[in-house]
Image (cartoon, helix red, strand yellow):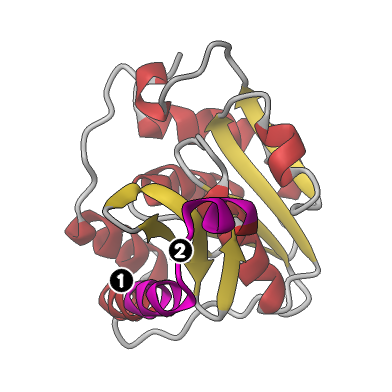
């Protein structure tokens, strides 16, 4: 469906072309989402920044998400937490650990640069795809908490049920493809290699330097 993340970014940028020249900030979700977001920001001629959400892992099964957090934001699945009997003590420790990791990553990615001001602007949250929507929901809420007056989630690929999950969170969803059945984001890319922290820093640095 997509050759690689650059191809996905170019096709998303075409879909978002009407935003060119407006008061817009593109927010990439690290790490793969930043590769896609950088292409969109470049082609629309708007600033690029990161939003760093993290999954809140279940006890003994960190891949099972109890929700997700971003800086100052918590989006938790209360039904699942209750069903698994997760204690508040565990939850607070896990959330604190993820918030620490968020701060570490933000400092590494941005260096000495402050976050791009979102107040009164449209924020376009971009990832290389969405599977369950937990981290995307936290990213959307983070953008809104920073004063964005409109939040658009734009992704190349996601399952159809994401419309119900994230439709109420975002002002607008831009999803290029919603294939069924949907198993994993990577299956819809010919090339879907890991993106390093160094690559994220490089992409943000290029934008910062105007190159």
Residue 73 in percent (x, y) is at 58, 74
Which one is nearer the viewer's eye here, 180 or 197?
A: 180
Q: CA distance from mark 2 to mark 1?
A: 32 Å
Residue 103 sits in which quadrant?
Answer: bottom left
Vertical position of residue 113 compared to residue 87: above or below: below
At 48% across and 59% down in the image, what residue appears? 85
Q: How far across and how far down the image is residue 179, in percent?
A: 58, 14
Q: Which residues are magenta?
A: 79-98
Label at residue 118: none
Residue 161 spot, x, y in % from top left: 68, 28
Return the mark for residue 86: 2
Q: Is residue 79 left or right of residue 59?
A: right
**Mark closer to the chain start, 2 or 1:** 2
Query: Residue at the location (27% across, 23% down)?
Result: 191
The answer to whether mark 2 and mark 1 are in CB contact below 8 A is: no
Q: Which quadrant of the figure contains the C terminus? A: bottom left
Tell me the residue that label 1 is attached to.
Answer: 109
Q: Is residue 30 visible?
A: yes
Q: Image point 76% across, 36% down: which residue?
A: 164
Is there any visible trace of residue 45 in the rendered image?
Answer: no
Asked whether 148 or 80 is in front, the reply is: 80
């Amino acid at each position: 469906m997509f050759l690689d993340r650059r191809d996905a970014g170019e096709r998303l940028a075409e879909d978002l072309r009407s935003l060119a020249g407006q008061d817009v900030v593109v927010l990439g979700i690290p790490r793969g989402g930043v590769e896609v977001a950088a292409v969109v920001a470049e082609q629309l001629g708007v600033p690029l920044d990161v939003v760093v959400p993290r999954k809140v892992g279940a006890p003994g099964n960190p891949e099972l998400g109890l929700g997700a957090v971003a800086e100052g934001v918590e989006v938790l699945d209360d039904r699942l937490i209750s069903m698994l009997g997760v204690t508040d003590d565990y939850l607070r420790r896990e959330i604190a650990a993820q918030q620490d990791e968020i701060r570490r990553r933000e400092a590494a990615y941005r260096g000495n640069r402050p976050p791009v001001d979102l107040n009164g602007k449209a924020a376009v949250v971009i990832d290389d795809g969405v599977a369950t929507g937990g981290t995307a929901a936290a990213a959307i809420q983070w953008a809104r908490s920073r004063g964005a007056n409109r939040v658009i989630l734009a992704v190349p690929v996601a399952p159809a049920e994401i419309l119900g999950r994230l439709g109420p969170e975002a002002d607008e969803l831009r999803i290029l493809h919603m294939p069924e059945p949907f198993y994993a984001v990577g299956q819809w890319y010919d090339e879907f290699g890991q993106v390093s922290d160094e690559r994220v820093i490089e992409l943000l640095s290029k934008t910062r330097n105007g190159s």
